Image: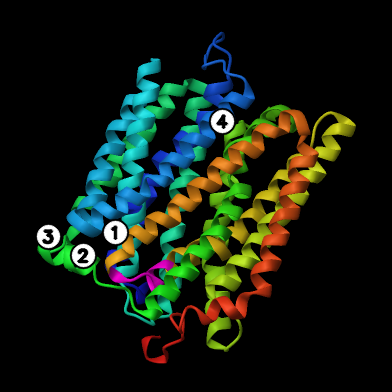
Amino acid sequence: MFKEHPKGLYILFFTEMWERFSYYGMRAILTLYMVTSVAGNNPGLGWDDAFALSIYGWYTMAVYVMSIPGGIIADRWLGQKKTVLWGGILLVIGHSILAIEAMWAFATGLTLIVLGVGGLKPNISTLVGGLYKEGDPQRDVGFTIFYIGINIGAALATLVVGAVGELLGWHYGFGLAGIGMTLGLIQYLYGQKYLKGVGEAPAKQKETKEAIHTPLTKIEKDRMIVLFLSFFIIVAFWAGFEQAGGLMTIYTNTKVDRMLLGWQVPTTWFQFLNPFFIITFGTIVATFWLKRQKAGKESSTLFKMAIGTMIMGLGFLMMTGAATQASNTGQAGMYWLIFAYLLHTIGELCASPTALSFITKLAPVKYASFMMGAYFAATGIGNKIAGMIGETASTAGEFQVFTGIFIYTAIIGILVLLFLKKLKALTHGAEDFVEGNV
């Protein structure tokens, strides 16, 4: 399976692995840092839960919304490879500044991370798509392999950065995230020879302007329509999924029995479950869908996204069970979280890597990075909504919030399935199986 893919995929795999190590490491401790008291051995900012979740929502939204200008810069001027490079440099600086214990450093570091992710995130995904020929069914598998790289970084981060930040000091954790991004940047520079001809800068500014103002064909317009419609699914998915970094983290910290054989498991370590399950089940899920496609069964990206959204929503039924147990006994068992993260992960594997591949199939070449940026902007909006939903838990109650998320994800998934045939028609065969590319 792994030998069938270009070497450039693995350069991007490890680059993204270290970038996600830095991002998810910082994310694992960010909310806890904001809500931890200013007094004690490891002081935080002492903010209340609702305000911290609001900041978390705005920050995670900004990170992904900046993918739109990042994509435009790549499409019009720098190309994807150079924009990824500059994004990586900004990330190294931003994470390093967060290691400084001062409010100006906190604000400056987060700002630079927002700018850096905006440059790197959409363009490295576009580079992955550029490694494959049109109609190659291995493209979806390639994106899943790339996605595993993301989650190896996330898994390492939640264990290492999470433990360092929570047990030794928040700013040591932030600094460690910066070291991870530095390794990713070095690795990316080393692997440029495997990315020749992919993501290059536009040859001439005049030619670029002419290409951008060339009218879209009917097929291109239809495909853009279905892409934008798919973004509504993305918003709904991430509005639920991203409770992991906010509400579920706070809930785990306060209402879950974390004792295991006389030792208390760090709160941040529960975020290890999602990337661990992705690494474990990633190729299994990708292979399942590939075999289904070869067998001629329904395996379109929109179908996968609908199924994935509903499976992810089922995870919140587990959290409903946790909330019920906590209200009756005072604390919830860890097993509720484990099953919730497992269902979230299976849903994510169905919906997220295939969505990245979907964009590279449907978006016109001249708008490739812009559309990838729009996808991540939709992710960012979902992140913001996740923060807003999390804020309501302090008044509405966790049981109501978790149950509500399950209901709305089920509705979204069912609606997509009802209109699947009409939506697929707008793709004009972009996902048709090409036997010669196997």
Main SS of the magenta segment?
helix
Q: How much space separates mark 1 and mark 4, taking CA atoms? A: 36 Å
In x, y percent, where is residue 295? 57, 88
Who comes first in sequence, dot 4 or dot 2? Answer: 4
Residues packed near mark 2 inside 10 Å, few (<14), some (14 to 19) or many (20 plus): some
Whole-percent x and y of residue 10?
Answer: 32, 62
**Are circles 4 and 2 on residues that touch, CB within 8 Å?**
no
Tell me which amino acid carries mark 1: Ile
Residue under circle 3?
Answer: 205
Q: Which residue is mark 4?
A: 54
Indicate the secondary structure of the residue bearing disc 1: helix
Location of the N terminus by quadrant is bottom left
- Which sits earlier in the primary sequence, circle 4 or circle 3? 4
Please name the residue that numbered disc 2 is placed on.
194
The magenta region covers 359-365
Nearer to us of marks 1 and 4 is 4
> Which x, y percent locates residue 379?
50, 51
